[in-house]
Image (cartoon, coloured by chain):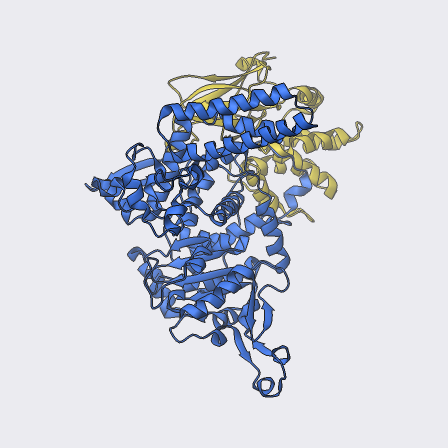
Chain colours: A blue, B yellow
Amino acid sequence: MANRWLKISTSPTTPAVSGGVDQWTAEDLFRDHDQPADRSMDEKLRQSYYWIVNRAVISPYYDIEFSTRLPVSFPLGDAGATLTLPTEASYSSNVLLPLLTFAVGGKCLLIGGPGRGKTTVAVLMGVLAGSSSDEVRRGVRQGQPQLTISDLVGIPLPRDLINAASLSEITIAWKDWLTRPVKIIDEYNRIPTKTQSALLTMVAEGYVESHDQVHATNPDKGVESWFFTANDDAGGGTFPVIQALRDRMDVTVQAASFNSRFLDELITRVEAGEKPEEHVPGDLVFSREEQVAMRAQIRAVPVPAPIRRRLEFFLSHFEFVQHGGRRFEYRTKDTVTTAGGRVGEVIDANTGADLATDLGAQTINGLSVRALQTLIVYAKAIAWFRRADEVGVDDVAAILPFVLRGKLLPNPTHPRFDIGAERELATDVMSWLSDLFTESCRQFEALGRGKQDPVRDLLAQLDAGLDGVSAVEVSRRITEIESRIRAVSGTRKLYGRDFDDLTTLKYLHQRYTAYARWAQRS
Amino acid sequence: MPGHLANEAIPRSSRSATALDVPGLDLALATRNVERAHGDPMRFALAFAAGYHADLAMAREMAVTVVAVAAWRAGAMALRDDALARIEALPAEDVTSRRVVSAALGPAVDDLASFLEHQRTDRFWWPGRAANRGYVCSVGGFAGLGGAWVAPPTQGFALSEPGAFGILAGDTWWRLDADVWGSRLTRLDDAPDPASDHSVSIVCQPTSYLAWVLVRDAA
């Protein structure tokens, strides 16, 4: 009987749509095109994706949607539910995001109730990285309240503990899992805080320390990815997750529930007693060199200027808060938080801006540089996975909620979360984040930022260099900067997007006035 | 229904090229690849069989030439250049080979040289075109009846590449690649740039889901 696990998509999973007729010779008609001689890396990753969703994990969910035309949608029920049928290939987040994490060497947090396949997905990633299913299973670290650092990383040899004259003479029996390309920590919110700190060092710095001995977690400089699971993402669990470790999670993915219509498939597996990770086809396993090449290809996907401008605009909304401080530069949410204040109350105190327009008022924090870097890497990854030449707005929109979940936190006192159907967004963080980006893009268009961006133009002028710029020209630019600041001042309203522009204008003013002073002296 | 006028004279048949046993040629694989190249496997079978039966003692290299010609004749445009090059490479005095090619391709042996001469500059030429006022083929069709489009085409124009056209059906742009025997439609992400060539027109009518390819200079 044919092994049903071994079937891999034979036709290209994302056919090109550009058209044109490639010329063949008669000899090409006698070549088996079903066995491409040089399968590209992105095709291999797509085949892995389709193998997992079609064979390994029962996941008929397509929540990462792509459409090039207006998709057909159906209103359902009387509570505003809508089902859309996307026009392009769409994906299941609880498989795609772990797969992209494996490809970029990231850190993925899988959340959801018990028995939803979180650990299975993570184990599959380990097998794709070249380990056997037994090795991967053995390497899974199970979070539990008694887990010590020694349990996690290994123990010093008892012989050395007795004989050693100094710490440097102690040999540590490091655990094997530490150097595996895919590392899996199950139920990380059940790990004691002290052990979490040791875990943080591994995740953040790539090494582990015990008895003054240091051990690198990625000694051969390959691609290292981490998978964490948790039943809760709202601070529950035996121990609260330390914020620094939580912040290291590049993407957060909710495991999907089981679709009752697929019970027959489940019964088949129960009867066969099969585990999908034991049946991963060899063709889908990535060698170390392939993993390194795949990550390099992903990093090389360009982010075009229009996408950069949209991202820049989106990021500008969140750090500023009007009454956060006295000095202009200190009017930030970080100032309030680090002083022990409540950002929600400070936002409420601001009567000058329109809360419906001010996207920054919907969050209690800004975005870290780490979150932005992650967003860029994963947007590149999904564009590459979809075989795009460059990152598109739809790529950013698709990945953004998974990256910013748990990082961009909603302001529960914002009126938006207290009005009619919008109340749903208080619990559906993913939809809220997605909506936030959509609204930001709408404002970007409405303000004509894609066509006219004077602050960007001024930055470009400076980037062109000051060599040979005359004193008159410098003076003209300083006047223009001041006039831009005056224009914002004249509106008597201030938003996050203005805050970043104004600090940039001040930076430009500093650079030009410093240059003018230097030119005057010399 | 969409189709090429030059193909209408060919009878439909369930005959398969795989029924022929040609030593050294995997015709089953070739047939699959012709289909992959958007050719019609039945027409491929007919054209190959016609050519092969014209000289059952042909060498493997000549049989491969017949495969290329038959694939082009079956609508696999990817084989057009190779088929033309192989025919041109045949020795002028080799009457048997010309008879084989003629049988596979369609035109009579005496008309073969003229046909090839026209094809070098006009990929839509065939002897019956003038009598049909330049009509070459119709493409598209209603998706509900097995065609490509869910809305009638409203405009079309030539692109810069030979045999390529842009056609707007509903709110979607399509690229049409066509020659005398084959055509292929692929969806485009954006509107293509029209070329200045007006020798071949795309005719659209509001009452039809088909788009017609017409050559102005029908002769």
> For residue B98, what is the image quadrant?
top right
Residue A376 located left or right of residue A446: right
Q: Residue at x 62, y 65 (%)?
A: A219
Looking at the picture, tell me which residue is in the foreground, A349 or B164.
A349
Q: Using the rendered image of the protein, determine whether residue B24 is visible from the camera's viewpoint.
A: yes
Quadrant into which the C terminus of chain A falls: top right
> For residue A146, what is the image quadrant?
bottom left
Q: Residue A344, position in %: x, y?
A: 30, 45
Looking at the picture, tell me which residue is in the foreground, B133 or A338.
A338
Looking at the picture, tell me which residue is in the foreground, A30 or B173.
B173
Residue A217 located left or right of residue B154: right
Tell how many labels: 0
Q: Can you say whether A273 is above or below A312 in the image?
A: below
Q: Residue A34, position in %: x, y?
A: 58, 49
Q: Using the rendered image of the protein, determine whether residue A2 is visible from the camera's viewpoint.
A: no
Residue A347 located left or right of residue B34: left
Looking at the picture, tell me which residue is in the foreground, A52 or A195.
A195
> For residue A400, what is the image quadrant?
top left
Residue furthest to the left in view is: A78
Q: Residue A29, position in %: x, y?
A: 64, 42
Q: Residue A115, position in %: x, y?
A: 34, 65
